[in-house]
Image (cartoon, rainbow, N blue to C red):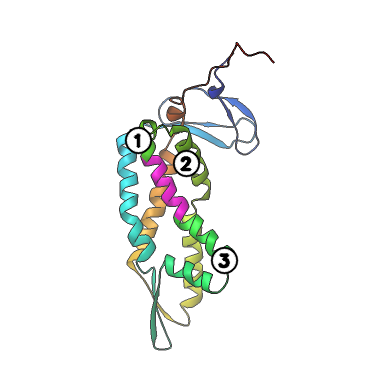
């Protein structure tokens, strides 16, 4: 019987596909729906660690520094991500606030933590390798900084005619964090880490 870890499921059409070793810088696509499945890159764990550490350094500025400075009717104000989430919560938009907090803050931070734990070997040392891999698989689908930035730009275009609006330092940090997360999503290949997860041998002594 073949190794079950050599079979993957297409996330778009659920087709079972045998996973094969690719040459460097090549990509595998689903033969049915052409969904991108995985690729093989020349990125080393140390390079992934460098990217995640850079992301950690960007987090405080991206979340707490002003994204926009707004002057309207002689009143100056600024906005950052956490202020926006708290404002939504105060307006009783708890579901929207929780969704923004999850997709804009927790999921990107969890993605960085998960990839750092895998690339540094901490996940294997702490015996949480499967948990870290499953967490990264979840966070990669929920980290949506690009959606947050797109909505921020839409708000900016609506305000520019009635107010004086300037970008803050937090916007630059958030944009860099978004690009860094996208790079990690493209470059991180979980397959080598899944191969380190020990397979459970069936107990042949047990009878049905």
Nearer-the-camera pick, 66 or 182? 66
Residue that label 3 marks: 94
Queried whether the magenta region covers residue 113, the answer comes back as: yes
Can you say which quadrant of the picture contains the N terminus? Answer: top right
> Which label sits in the foreground, 2 or 1?
1
**Residue 115 placed where, x, y %?**
40, 40
Residue that label 1 marks: 122
Q: In this picture, which residue range is highlighted in magenta?
A: 106-116
Q: Above or below — where is 197 with respect to 136?
A: above
Residue that label 2 marks: 136
Q: Residues within 10 Å of mark 1 (few under 14, many from 20)?
A: some
Q: Look at the numbered disc 2 and give the secondary structure of its residue.
A: helix
Task: Report the residue at 44% width, 56% height from top.
Answer: 105
Cβ–Cβ below 8 Å for labels 2 and 1?
no
> Which label sits in the foreground, 3 or 2?
3
Q: Residues within 10 Å of mark 3 (few under 14, many from 20)?
A: some
Cβ–Cβ below 8 Å for labels 3 and 1?
no
Q: Residue furthest bottom?
A: 74
Can you say which quadrant of the picture contains the C terminus? Answer: top right
**Residue 64 placed where, x, y %?**
36, 65
Q: Residues within 10 Å of mark 2 (few under 14, many from 20)?
A: many
Cβ–Cβ below 8 Å for labels 3 and 2?
no
Label located before the other in sequence (2 or 1): 1
Nearer-the-camera pick, 121 or 44? 121
Task: Report the residue at 53% width, 64% height from top.
Answer: 97
The Cα atoms of the two marked residues, 2 and 1, are separated by 14 Å
């Amino acid at each position: 019987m073949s190794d079950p870890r050599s079979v993957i499921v297409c996330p778009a059409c659920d087709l079972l596909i045998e996973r094969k070793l690719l040459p460097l810088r090549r990509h595998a696509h689903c033969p049915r729906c052409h969904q991108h499945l995985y690729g093989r890159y020349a990125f080393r764990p140390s390079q992934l660690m460098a990217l995640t550490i850079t992301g950690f350094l960007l987090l405080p500025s991206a979340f707490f520094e002003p994204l926009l400075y707004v002057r309207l009717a002689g009143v100056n104000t600024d906005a950052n991500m956490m202020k926006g989430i708290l404002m939504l919560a105060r307006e009783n938009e708890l579901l929207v606030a929780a969704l923004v907090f999850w997709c804009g803050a927790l999921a990107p931070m969890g993605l960085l933590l998960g990839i750092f734990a895998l690339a540094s070997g901490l996940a294997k040392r702490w015996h949480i390798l499967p948990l870290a891999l499953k967490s990264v698989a979840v966070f990669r689908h929920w980290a949506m900084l690009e959606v947050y930035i797109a909505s921020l730009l839409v708000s900016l275009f609506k305000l520019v005619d009635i107010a004086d609006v300037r970008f803050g330092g937090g916007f630059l940090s958030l944009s860099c964090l978004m690009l860094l997360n996208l790079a990690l999503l493209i470059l991180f290949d979980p397959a080598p880490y899944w191969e380190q997860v020990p397979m459970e041998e069936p107990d042949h002594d047990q009878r049905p």
